[in-house]
Image: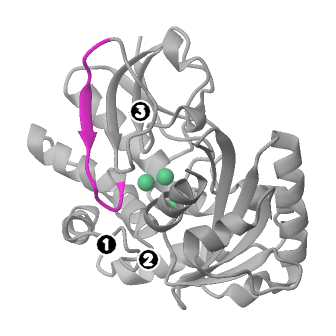
C-alpha cells in the first residue's frame, strides 16, 4: 500500500507541490508513495499545476489504516480525520510544531524557512536524487507563493538560494515574471463565491482553548476587494457562528503595499488591539490596517497566541 503524502486542509500551492515532490522522493528512495490533498485546489495552484503539466492529486480526508507523511503542517485541526488510526511515518514542514504526536519514531524535516519546498529541495540534495524538471517548476512557484516573492518576513536566504537553483532545473529564465503571473491569478476574485474566498486560505487554531480561525487573501492591490469587503465581513460572522468559533479573522494582504487589512469577527474584538497595539479604525469595529503584516504564520498567529493566553 502506497504511503499517502498530505498537506493541510484548504490546500495552498506549497501543500500540493510538497505532497507531489515528497511522494516522488519517497518513491525514488524505494518507498512507494503518492500525493493526496484534503480538498479542492485554489486557482493559483491550478495555474501552477497546469503550467508544469500536473493534474490535481486525488482527495483523501481520512487517515484510518493509512501510512502517512505530513507536509506543510503538524496541527491536528488542519490535518486528516482519524490521524491516530493511521501511522505517521514522516513530517516535512516549516511551521511551528503543532499538536500531532506519534507512538513510533519518525523521520522529521522541520526547518524555520519560508516554504516546505525549500526543505524538500535540500532533501533531494541530501539523498542525491535529481529533481525532475516539472517538479522543480511547481516547487519554485510554491516558494514564490509562500514567501510572497521574497517580501514576507518568513523568507530566508535558504529560500532565495532554493529558488535560484530550482529555476535552473525547471528551465525558468525569469521567475519574477512567473511569480507576478501567479499572483495575478491569485488576485482574481471576480465571480468567485464569497464563501470560497473566505476559505481559500483558511486555518483554524486552538488558542488557549478557544477556536480561532484565520483566513488570508493575498492580492496585488487591495482596492480590488473594495466591492466585496462588506460581504466578506458578513460571511466571516456566519462562519464564526457555524463553526462555534470564538473568532474568525480575515487578512486582506496587499502584496505591493506590504501590509494587511484585517476583518474581525470575534466575541472579544479587543484581542486585536492586545495582539497588535492598533485599535480598529472603523466605527463598526471590524476593520484594522496592519502595516508591514504579511505573514499569518510569523506575525499574526504568534501575536494572537500571546493575546489569547
Ligand atoms: Mg501552506
Ligand atoms: Mg507552506
Ligand atoms: Mg500562504
Q: Earlier in the sequence, mark 1 or mark 3?
A: 3
Q: In the depicted view, which residue is nearer to us: 164 or 297?
A: 297
At 38% from the left and 48% from the top, the residue drawn is 96
Q: In the depicted view, which residue is nearer to us: 15 or 43?
A: 15
Q: Earlier in the sequence, mark 2 or mark 1?
A: 1
State which mark lies toward you, 1 or 3. Answer: 3
Q: Which residue is mark 2?
A: 178
Q: Earlier in the sequence, mark 2 or mark 3?
A: 3
Please tell me in which quadrant of the rendered image residue 28 appears.
top left
- The quadrant of the rendering that contains the N terminus is top left
**How far across and down, in percent of the image, does residue 266 sit?**
78, 59
Please tell me in which quadrant of the rendered image residue 167 appears.
bottom left
Residue segment shown in magenta: 104-115
Q: In the depicted view, which residue is nearer to us: 179 or 245?
A: 245
Label 1 – label 3 distance at C-alpha: 28 Å
- 82 to 215, vertically: above or below: above
Left or right: 171 in relation to 65: left
Q: Tag 1: Cα neighbours inside 10 Å, few (<14), some, or many (≥20)?
A: some
Label 2 – label 1 distance at C-alpha: 8 Å
- 52 to 256, vertically: above or below: above
Task: Say how many tags the image has.
Answer: 3
At 75% from the left and 59% from the top, the residue drawn is 198
Decide: marks 2, 1 in contact (CB < 8 A)?
A: yes
Q: Secondary structure at mark 1?
A: loop
Q: Main secondary structure of the magenta part?
A: loop
At 74% from the left and 90% from the top, the residue drawn is 223
Q: Secondary structure at mark 2?
A: helix
Q: Is residue 1 magenta?
A: no
Amino acid at each position: 500500500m502506497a504511503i499517502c503524502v498530505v498537506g493541510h486542509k484548504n490546500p495552498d500551492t506549497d501543500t500540493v507541490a510538497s505532497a507531489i515532490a515528497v511522494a516522488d522522493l519517497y518513491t525514488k528512495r524505494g518507498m512507494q508513495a503518492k500525493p493526496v490533498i484534503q480538498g479542492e485546489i485554489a486557482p493559483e495552484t491550478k495555474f501552477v499545476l497546469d503550467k508544469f503539466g500536473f493534474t490535481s492529486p486525488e482527495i483523501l480526508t481520512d487517515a484510518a489504516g493509512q501510512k502517512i507523511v505530513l507536509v506543510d503542517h503538524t496541527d491536528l485541526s488542519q490535518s486528516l480525520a482519524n490521524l491516530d488510526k493511521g501511522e505517521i511515518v514522516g513530517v516535512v514542514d516549516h511551521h511551528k510544531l503543532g499538536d500531532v504526536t506519534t507512538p513510533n519514531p519518525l523521520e522529521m524535516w522541520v526547518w524555520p524557512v519560508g516554504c516546505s519546498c525549500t526543505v524538500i529541495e535540500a532533501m533531494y540534495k541530501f539523498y542525491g536524487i535529481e529533481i525532475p524538471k516539472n517538479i522543480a517548476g511547481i516547487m519554485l512557484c510554491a516558494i514564490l507563493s509562500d514567501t510572497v516573492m521574497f517580501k514576507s518576513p518568513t523568507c530566508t536566504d535558504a529560500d532565495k538560494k532554493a529558488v535560484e537553483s530550482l529555476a535552473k532545473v525547471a528551465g525558468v529564465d525569469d521567475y519574477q515574471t512567473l511569480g507576478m503571473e501567479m499572483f495575478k491569478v491569485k488576485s482574481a476574485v471576480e465571480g468567485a463565491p464569497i464563501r470560497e474566498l473566505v476559505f481559500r486560505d483558511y486555518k483554524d487554531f486552538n488558542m488557549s482553548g478557544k477556536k480561532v480561525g484565520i483566513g488570508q487573501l493575498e492580492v496585488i492591490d487591495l482596492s480590488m476587494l473594495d466591492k466585496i469587503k462588506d460581504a466578506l465581513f458578513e460571511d466571516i460572522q456566519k462562519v464564526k457562528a457555524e463553526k462555534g468559533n470564538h473568532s474568525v479573522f480575515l487578512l486582506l494582504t496587499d502584496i505591493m503595499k506590504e501590509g494587511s487589512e484585517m476583518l474581525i469577527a470575534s466575541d472579544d474584538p479587543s484581542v486585536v488591539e492586545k495582539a497588535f497595539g492598533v485599535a480598529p479604525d472603523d466605527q463598526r469595529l471590524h476593520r484594522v490596517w496592519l502595516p508591514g503584516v504579511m505573514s499569518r504564520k510569523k506575525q499574526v498567529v504568534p501575536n494572537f497566541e500571546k493575546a489569547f493566553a
